[in-house]
Image: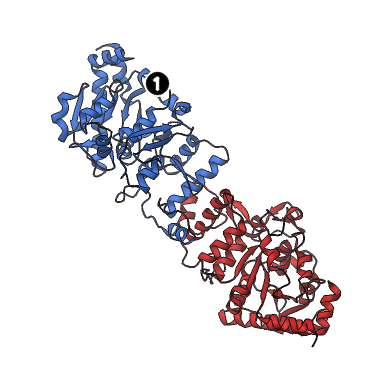
Chain colours: A blue, B red
Amino acid sequence: MSASVMSSSASAGGRVVALCGGVGGAKLALGLQSVLGPELHIVVNMADDFRHLGLHVSPDLDTVLYTLGGLSDRQRGWGRADESWNFMAALAQVGGETWFALGDRDLALHVERTRRLAAGESLTGIAADIAARFGLTAQVLPVTDDPIRTIVVTPDEELAFQRYFVARRCEPAVRAIRFDGAAEARLSAAVQAALQRAGLRMIVICPSNPFLSIDPVLAVPGLREALRAAGVPIVAVSPLVGGQAVKGPTRKIMDELGVEASTRAIAAHYRGLIDGLVLDIGDAAEADAVDVPVQAVPTLMTDDASKVKLAEDVLAFGDRLAASPQQSAHRDARS
Amino acid sequence: MSASVMSSSASAGGRVVALCGGVGGAKLALGLQSVLGPELHIVVNMADDFRHLGLHVSPDLDTVLYTLGGLSDRQRGWGRADESWNFMAALAQVGGETWFALGDRDLALHVERTRRLAAGESLTGIAADIAARFGLTAQVLPVTDDPIRTIVVTPDEELAFQRYFVARRCEPAVRAIRFDGAAEARLSAAVQAALQRAGLRMIVICPSNPFLSIDPVLAVPGLREALRAAGVPIVAVSPLVGGQAVKGPTRKIMDELGVEASTRAIAAHYRGLIDGLVLDIGDAAEADAVDVPVQAVPTLMTDDASKVKLAEDVLAFGDRLAASPQQSAHRDARS
């Protein structure tokens, strides 16, 4: 074993950085938190953030906070458990916009974050404080404190992401996806620190929508370079199960963008970035068409046990990649 | 009967303008609305308004809107009936300020108003729209669209009104009360229009706290002059019942300001402005010490019937004053 492999093995208790969007990614992040605790640093998409009713709403960030804080509604898939909707009923009564549902409990986070942002605090600082209050052991890091906004280009118009996703229920065809503000956004200092080589074990790309949730994270200047420079395995988990998205519009968007809805296409999308791909056991037939090492395991996360199991499988795969001279060479060649 | 008396009698179906603060005043306003419907124009104190959690909260305005819309919680005395408090519980969880309770339903009004104010709408325009949505027949008019803020001067510090009233529960002694911004505030065009002489029947000062709720209304430059120039009876309803305030700190504040807690002192406070005072039957012994005509009736409003009855008594008293040559002369001499 080479020195670099020794180093990777020795850091098996080290820091793991996970890139994450909303629901699907947060499920794996919960599994990773169970295994890793404070070693887990989750870099979260904030290009879905938007101003609604005068409030700063951060859908992916909040999904991660609620999920890892044990506060999420598992049936609904978003928002808080034990939620009530009296605010929305009263908002309708006073003529307010009701296309985006905000639960009474959920609303507290938006109101308080908006107040703190207006007082000059950063999204990063607020997320860290809320994560601590919710009892998370993992670190939750918005990729940037600068505004990035996902715009979905459809045949008829350009839609802000939540307008496309919620108000229009992903119905318009997607011609292109743009991340306004990304070119000027600065990678947060906390994310930069998390990606320092020392003590870093691996990087995981959670099974979030690559186009809508991971691309806007990767669009922040300097992040791809920082990921490559970290010198540890980068493992993506395919969001497809049997060629289908578990939830959300991944498959539909791939069709509309003219991308084959396949695990191979997911791997191609991340080509040059990832060292390995975890795919669903149901997609194992596609393994040969993927040009990085793959690990086929059950990826459908239906309960806590399956989230932890997938997290363990992903970590074990990453550790094996770190221990493989071929993959070390691959990483060296790439970086 | 003189021509002026004929005119006053002929206008018995005319417009009534009521000056109003929060809870006690709103009860009479509800009675007046039952009798008068769209003829009632309520000029509301907005010096209790404050910015809380980044939201524009208008306590008196909302008490009037909820009370006259049949939405208020009659037991609690403020806020909405059938209210829930999940927002507050979640706000505590994220470390937000919880000294001022905002119900889940109530919150919708604050969020929507704040959004509309930020979009450039006026408090007056928003109040009119909400009043219509809540099914009020009366007009609800903030006295001004400019900011006025009541400051309570205590021995130790100066407190914004809600800090004194809610956070400190009126405990600090009141040395003085100040209305910041009043000198620069402009009487709203809607209030000016409501006070035009044509079609005006009378002006009622509701049994709100004279020092905290009515004074900041009267502090808007031009309002006293407009009230006097209207040429109709101005009738105040004493907030004291048997020398005590029904609710709130009126009695305590009068003591602290060195004002005798009496109906006579209430009359003295409004001297030069009012043409008559409605006092509680239990304070009838003080009638002789009041230097304007008085009407002693039961003023404790415990149910809808007593609110309507007091409204009818107040209107009948005002109409009698309008029909009285002596009072017409009094008004002529005064104006």
The answer to whether residue A321 is above or below residue B116 is: above
Residue drawn where x is 39% and y is 43% of the image: A162
Do we see residue B283 in this rendering?
no
Left or right: residue A71 compared with residue B136: left
Residue drawn where x is 54% and y is 42% of the image: A116
**What x and y, as percent, mark residue A11?**
33, 22
Q: Quadrant of residue B78?
A: bottom right
Left or right: residue A313 compared with residue B169: left
Q: What is the residue that sits farthest to the left in this orientation?
A: A285
Residue drawn where x is 27% and y is 11% of the image: A2
Q: What is the residue that sits farthest to the right in this orientation?
A: B333
**What x and y, as percent, mark residue B214?**
71, 66
Residue drawn where x is 52% and y is 58% of the image: B109
Q: What is the residue that sits farthest to the bottom in this orientation?
A: B1
Left or right: residue B186 compared with residue A14: right
Q: Residue tagged by mark 1?
A: A226
**What x and y, as percent, mark residue B150?**
70, 57
Q: Secondary structure at mark 1?
A: helix
Which kind of residue does numbered mark 1 sit on?
Ala
Which of B166/A275 is in front?
A: A275
Quadrant of the snapshot with the C terminus of chain B? bottom right
Q: Quadrant of residue B220?
A: bottom right
The answer to whether residue A312 is above or below residue B210 is: above
Do we see residue B146 in this rendering?
yes
Q: Quadrant of residue B36?
A: bottom right
Which chain letter matches label 1? A
Quadrant of the snapshot with the N terminus of chain B? bottom right
